Image (tube, helix red, strand yellow):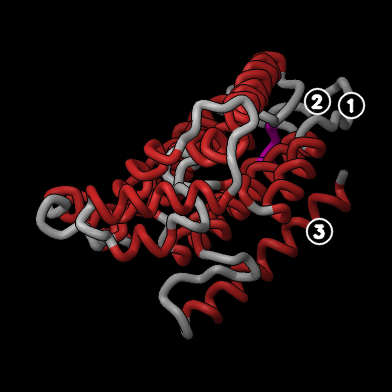
């Protein structure tokens, strides 16, 4: 367990260094992933897995609190460098919830200090990329006049995605979905160029992506995975027996505006994270910091 924690911390530090170096060359880093959004999701998944391992190894001690702070700062910095809005808006809140849940027995003064630090992350992180955040409201207000924007393209993709869905148990081929979606884009979204180009890759929504290609059975499988994982993770939080909740919930939230599990490498990382988050070092947790 200790070796795993050390390896992941070193890896996260090296990722921050590499991310900063890449940021000097391009505004949105994507590291070794296919896109900046994928990089953000993988960073969040690995970070919460690392936090769980730290908690298992060190419990609610000063060492664990220090490691939590270091991991949170490095993760938020990397997420900021990806400029992925869904990750920027949700990750600080998830860190705040994690601290409340996992560090309930920490000394009250220290706990309050770190809660303030978490709240600062919630405020500061979106502020750093405020231009990207402001684009959301601007793109929405301009959608009917100009839909060739990041948010406008998503709206068009979601609409065309629903149009392309075939009421089938097993779904349809990617080519059939693309053809139907592009027909809708040409007719009803003023031939949105960004949506027309990107609709062949994914529909920027996890449930819609699965439903359109794998049909009703695929959607049921995805929902079953989410529901059982959340319930298992929730009772794990109460019993302090696993860290699954903080791996699955970010995927669900970020999956509202993107297709997170579309790539094999991402699925592999998520599966490894879920496996690690079920490890138990011992039944006796290290003494809490007082």
Q: Which label was assigned to residue 19?
A: none
x and y percentages locating residue 36 in the rendered image: 51, 64
Left or right, 183 with reference to 54: left
Element under disc 1: loop
Q: Nearer the viewer, mark 3 or mark 1?
A: 3
Front residue of 133/221: it is: 221
- Badge 1: few (under 14), some or many (20 or more) residues near its Cα, within 10 Å? few
Measured Cα–Cα span from mark 3 to mark 1: 21 Å
The residue beneath circle 3 is 7
Q: Position of residue 283 (x, y in %)?
A: 87, 20
Q: Is residue 19 above or below residue 117?
A: below
User: Tag 3's secondary structure?
Assistant: helix
Residue drawn where x is 65% and y is 21% of the image? 224
Q: Is residue 200 left or right of residue 47?
A: left
Position of 164 relative to 249 (above/below):
below
Locate the C terminus by quadrant: top right
Tally of marks: 3
- Which residue has dot 1 on it? 282
Kindly identify the residue that appears in the image at 25 percent across and 60 percent down. 191
Judge from the rendering whether residue 187 lies leftward or rightward of residue 218; answer left or right.
Answer: left
Q: Secondary structure at mark 2?
A: loop
Which residues lie in the magenta part? 60-64
How many residues crowd around disc 2 within 10 Å: few (fewer than 14), some, or many (20 or more)? some
Q: Give the residue drawn at x 67%, y 61%.
A: 12
Q: Quadrant of residue 220?
A: top right
The residue carrying mark 2 is: 285
Distance Cα–Cα, label 2 vs label 1: 7 Å
Q: Quadrant of residue 217?
A: top right
Q: Where's residue 167, x and y in %? A: 50, 26
What crowding class fits label 3: few (fewer than 14 Cα within 10 Å), some (14-19), or many (20 or more)? few
* Residues tagged 2 and 1 counted as in contact (Cβ below 8 A): yes
């Amino acid at each position: 367990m200790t070796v795993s924690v050390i390896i992941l911390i070193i890896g996260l530090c090296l990722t921050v260094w590499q991310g900063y170096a890449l940021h000097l060359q391009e505004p949105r880093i994507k590291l070794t992933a296919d896109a900046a959004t994928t990089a953000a999701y993988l960073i969040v998944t690995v970070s919460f897995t690392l936090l769980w391992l730290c908690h298992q190894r060190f419990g609610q001690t000063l060492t664990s609190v220090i490691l939590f702070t270091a991991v949170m700062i490095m993760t938020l910095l990397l997420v900021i460098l990806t400029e992925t809005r869904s990750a920027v808006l949700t990750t600080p809140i998830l860190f705040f919830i994690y601290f409340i849940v996992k560090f309930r027995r920490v000394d009250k003064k220290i706990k309050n200090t770190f809660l303030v630090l978490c709240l600062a992350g919630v405020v500061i992180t979106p502020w750093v990329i405020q231009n990207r955040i402001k684009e959301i409201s601007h793109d929405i207000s301009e959608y009917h006049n100009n839909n060739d924007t990041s948010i406008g393209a998503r709206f068009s993709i979601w609409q065309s995605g629903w149009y392309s869905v075939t009421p089938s148990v097993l779904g349809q081929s990617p080519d059939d979905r693309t053809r139907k979606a592009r027909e809708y884009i040409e007719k009803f979204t003023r031939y949105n160029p960004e949506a027309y180009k990107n609709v062949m890759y994914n529909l920027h929504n996890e449930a819609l992506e699965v439903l359109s290609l794998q049909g009703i059975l695929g959607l049921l499988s995805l929902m079953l995975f989410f529901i059982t994982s959340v319930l298992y993770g929730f009772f794990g939080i109460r019993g302090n027996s696993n860290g699954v909740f903080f791996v699955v919930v970010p995927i669900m939230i970020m999956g509202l505006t993107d297709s997170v599990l579309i790539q094999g490498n991402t699925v592999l990382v998520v599966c490894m994270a879920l496996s690690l988050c079920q490890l138990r070092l011992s039944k006796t947790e290290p003494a809490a910091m007082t």
